[in-house]
Amino acid sequence: MVAEKRNPRAEALQLLGLARRAGTVVLGIQRTRDSLRSGRAVLVVVAEDASGAQLNKIEGLRKVRDVPRVSVGDRTALGAALGGPPLSAAAVTDGRLARQILLRLTDGGPGES
């Protein structure tokens, strides 16, 4: 019997899809900023190839609110996981799903600062 190799990134992308179906994720830079401002965002997920100019729009708020950030795939992969076109950023608003995503991508750590 061959053990399957675990793919944490694929698992995290699947969890993001689940979050989308549950209505606990917001898509795009502007909606991510809005969820950070309102205090609803508990995790920010960004694409590895997102432009710095776009990410700068959310970084200040994210740091002030002390919300962790993780990178997961490129814009195309992030958008596909969430059922849409290429996407630079999303925010997860459900704490339990956010923790599960963090566990897969950071080995239980607090995420990127």
Image (tube, grey):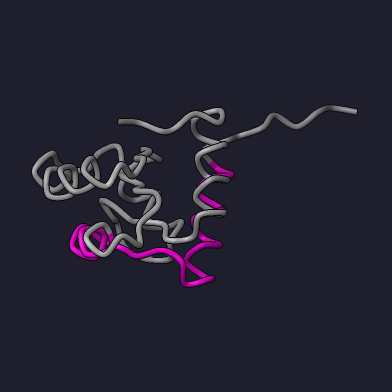
The magenta segment: 10-35
Q: Residue 39 placed where, x, y %? A: 31, 60
User: Relative to residue 104, is residue 26 drawn left or right?
Assistant: left
Main secondary structure of the magenta stretch? helix
Q: Residue 44 placed where, x, y %? A: 34, 48
Q: Magenta stretch containing residue 68, yes or no?
A: no
Q: Is residue 34 above or below residue 59?
A: below
Q: Between residues 110 and 45, which one lies in front from this camera angle?
A: 110
Q: Residue 6 placed where, x, y %? A: 66, 32
Q: Quadrant of the N terminus?
A: top right
Q: Residue at x 56, y 62 (%)?
A: 18
Q: Is residue 26 above or below residue 4?
A: below
User: In the rendered image, which quarter is residue 104 located in?
Assistant: top right
Q: Residue at x 30, y 31 (%)?
A: 113
Q: Residue at x 28, y 55 (%)?
A: 87
User: Relative to residue 36, is residue 10 drawn left or right?
Assistant: right
User: Relative to residue 8, is residue 79 drawn left or right?
Assistant: left
Q: Is residue 13 above or below residue 26?
A: above
Q: Is residue 64 above or below residue 30?
A: above
